[in-house]
Image (cartoon, helix red, strand yellow):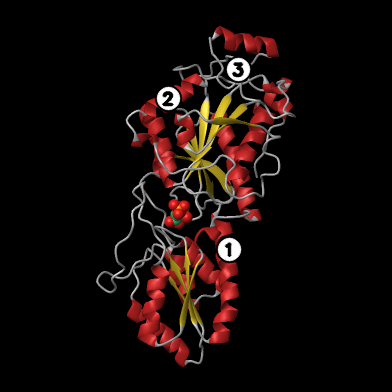
Amino acid sequence: GEVERSADQHAGDGADQVVVSEEQHEDRRHDQGVDDPLAHQPLPRHRSTAVPTHCRQCYHQRRGGSNRRSGTIALVRVGILTGGGDCPGLNAVIRAAVRKGERVHGDEIVGFLDACDGVQERRTIPLSIESMRGTLPRGGTVLGTRRGSPFDTPDGVARVQQTFSDLALDGLIVIGGNGSLSIACKLHADFGLPIVGVPKTIDNDIVGTDTTFGFNTAVQIATDAIDRLHTTAESHDRVLVVEVMGRHTGWIATHAGIAGGATAVLIPELPFDLDELCARLARRHDRGRFASIVVVAEGAEPRPGTLDVGEREIDRFGHVRLGGIASRVAHEIGSRTGFETRVVQLGHIQRGGTPTAYDRVLSTRFGVGAIDAVHDRRWGTMTVLRGEQVEYEDLTVAVGRTRTVDMQLFDGVAEHYFA
Ligand code: F6P
């Protein structure tokens, strides 16, 4: 388990720390000539503007300074953003980082709205323990999220740098999937920005961490749906084809398929053969079972040359717009076997609503890990889960790679139950 230092312990360790008064702190910002662009922003009514005594001893990174502990006294101002698709547990990460940041480290936390757009356009909201109250069980993200990147426009990175300097940001926490973590990695590696990452995605496909928050919730939602579909499929002797999310990997499909007792699971990692699937369904029906559930990950593809899936639409960020493979599969099953088939596309239901208890705990641990990483100056890293422990891994590990389904789980466990 994680051991949090108490406020007093925090204040007590580190010989180079000096207690300063609130006035001294203000003087320092004034001396630095920092024109505080956040000063005009209204604080929540109940937020205290006083800095707790135990929080006045923080390491402040001098602009362009070295990595050594400077000993300069200042509040640490940390930005947080959420990028990419939303995911249950994002608010829990923000809340945890804000809570530990404000209460233990004495940080001032700034939320950037709409991912990197908010950084480039300097759209911020102050975040506090008070303002984050009640958000632990809430899905989505209070900060809003977008896909785009500052690398998409010629002056995007310069605007991000300008925001860091104008807001006197000491660090930025980027909570995102593969896309956002790649942007974070590049901003750190190529432009030296002090960034730490937190991996998120319901797809569970980020390399470096054993799991991502949001995945457990998505699997539970898909499993609940499959449970319900069993009874209607059995009543009508139908094949129900359920499409779940999973752009590059079949983690949700595999886990929900096992948990929901599916007949077959089609995943992007293993191109499927419809003749094989239909033969399997026919064998099952010959044995007297007249209802089947087939789970299809949205990114699943037929073996080359076996089925024409048509043209795929590309969105404005260059992503193939997925969704619809289940209809194609259901149509083929129906026409090749004569079994009555129906389709259910779960889509964004899997991303919406409250996170499971597991995801709330993981998100909270990642939030705490992220704010600690800021204070430990672990720039260019992200929080990861390894076994039972939250640890840190270089962002580079996640870039350009995809964590695919464990084939031991698929072949060794799932396949025995399917069909
Ligand atoms: O990245 C997670 C994910 O849920 C994918 O599985 C899916 O393809 C994608 O997001 C859909 O995102 P959106 O429709 O929000 O762009």
Amino acid carrying mark 1 in the image = Ile
Q: Residue at x 34, y 67 (%)?
A: 301
Kindly state the secondary structure of the residue where label 3 is placed: loop
Q: Are marks 1 and 2 in contact (CB under 8 Å)?
A: no
> Could you give the CA–CA distance between mark 3 and mark 1, rounded to whole angstroms?
45 Å
Spot occupied by residue 214 in the image (x, y as percentages of width and height): 55, 53
Tally the marks: 3
Q: Residue at x 44, y 22 (%)?
A: 162
> Could you give the CA–CA distance between mark 1 and mark 2, rounded to whole angstroms?
40 Å
Amino acid carrying mark 2 in the image = Gln
Kindly state the secondary structure of the residue where label 1 is placed: helix
Spot occupied by residue 289 in the image (x, y as percentages of width and height): 51, 88
Mark 2 beta carbon near ligand 1 (under 8 Å):
no
Q: Is residue 331 left or right of residue 46?
A: left
Q: Between disc 3 and disc 1, whose residue precedes?
A: 3
What's the mark number on residue 221?
1
Q: Identify the residue under disc 2.
A: 161
Q: Identify the residue under disc 3.
A: 74
Q: Residue at x 48, y 92 (%)?
A: 287
Residue 222 image-quadrant placement: bottom right
Q: Is residue 397 left or right of residue 201?
A: left
Q: Is residue 407 above or below residue 320?
A: below
Q: Is residue 123 left or right of residue 268?
A: right
| Front: mark 3 or 1 | 1
Q: Is residue 315 left or right of residue 208?
A: left
What's the mark number on residue 410?
none
Picture quadrant of ligand 1: bottom left
Residue closest to the eye, 66 or 227: 227
